[in-house]
Amino acid sequence: MERYEFGNPDSANILVQLIGDHELSGMEKEVAHIREMAGEDFFLQAYKVDDWNLELSPWQAPAVFGDAGFGGGAGDTLKEILPELTHDNKTYFIGGYSLAGLFALWAAYQTDLFKGVAAASPSIWFPGFVDYMKAGEIKADRVYLSLGNREAKTRNPVMAIVTDCIEMSFDLLRKQGVTSTLEWNEGNHFKDADIRTAKAFAWVLRK
């Protein structure tokens, strides 16, 4: 898995983000926005996956758009990156956009390594995920959630429940005593992904 690095390599704050090819071109802009909102003190390690639906999905699920189903390879992805996150004097945060945001949430149920989760417009509609959250307890101290105010306006019946899912998830986290927020952004799922992700990371860093 290719790794891209941004920010201050000596920082005690390590941001971990899973990205796809489509996000590479926006990373410099994202990093600039994080720096503007949260200061200089972070080092972002971005890991590029080759198969978005396979490598970031926590379990197998049928396709919800197109022909590409979800392969349930998140466990293997997490096992690949964890050996690189072993510094005792570092604080780790994990985040991402869309399915990578869902992966970040899921990862924080698997390990207590991550202090905070920056889940920007996460694919919280993923079949069975809200029930998974209800059955477990997240190991992170703080969680940022966001959604575009037009993301539920879709003809896809699975994705159309995203507003209900994110509100249930936010309520669940608060009841479990997790420091959390839910921010609404203007637009659909494809608007300002880099800025939304930057806002998510800046929030967990500032907290």
Image: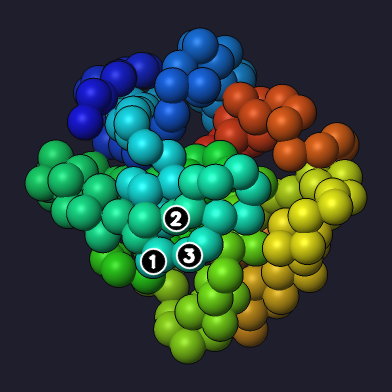
Q: Earlier in the sequence, mark 2 or mark 1?
A: 1
Foreground label between 1 and 3: 3
Residue position for label 2: 70
Horizontal side of 165 relative to 94 (left or right) equals: right
Q: Amino acid at mark 3?
A: Ala
Horizontal side of 198 relative to 137 (left or right) equals: right
Residue 75 at x, y = what percent?
26, 59
* Residue at the image position 20 percent from the left and 44 percent from the top: 81
* Residue at the image position 44 percent from the left and 55 percent from the top: 70
In the rendered image of this protein, does residue 90 appear above or below residue 23? below
The foreground one among 64 and 141 is 64
Q: Which mark is residue 59?
A: 1
Q: Please say if the residues under marks 3 and 2 sit with CB atoms less than 8 Å apart.
A: yes
Mark pair 2, 1: CA separation: 7 Å
* Residue at the image position 78 percent from the left and 55 percent from the top: 156
The foreground one among 205 and 170 is 170
Residue 39 in sight in this render: yes
Q: How is the image coloured?
A: rainbow
SS class of the residue under badge 2?
strand
Residue 30 at x, y = what percent?
55, 21
Q: Which mark is residue 61?
A: 3
Q: Please say if the residues under marks 1 and 3 sit with CB atoms less than 8 Å apart.
A: yes
SS class of the residue under badge 1?
loop
Q: Amino acid at mark 2?
A: Phe
SS class of the residue under badge 3?
strand
* Residue at the image position 10 percent from the left and 46 percent from the top: 83
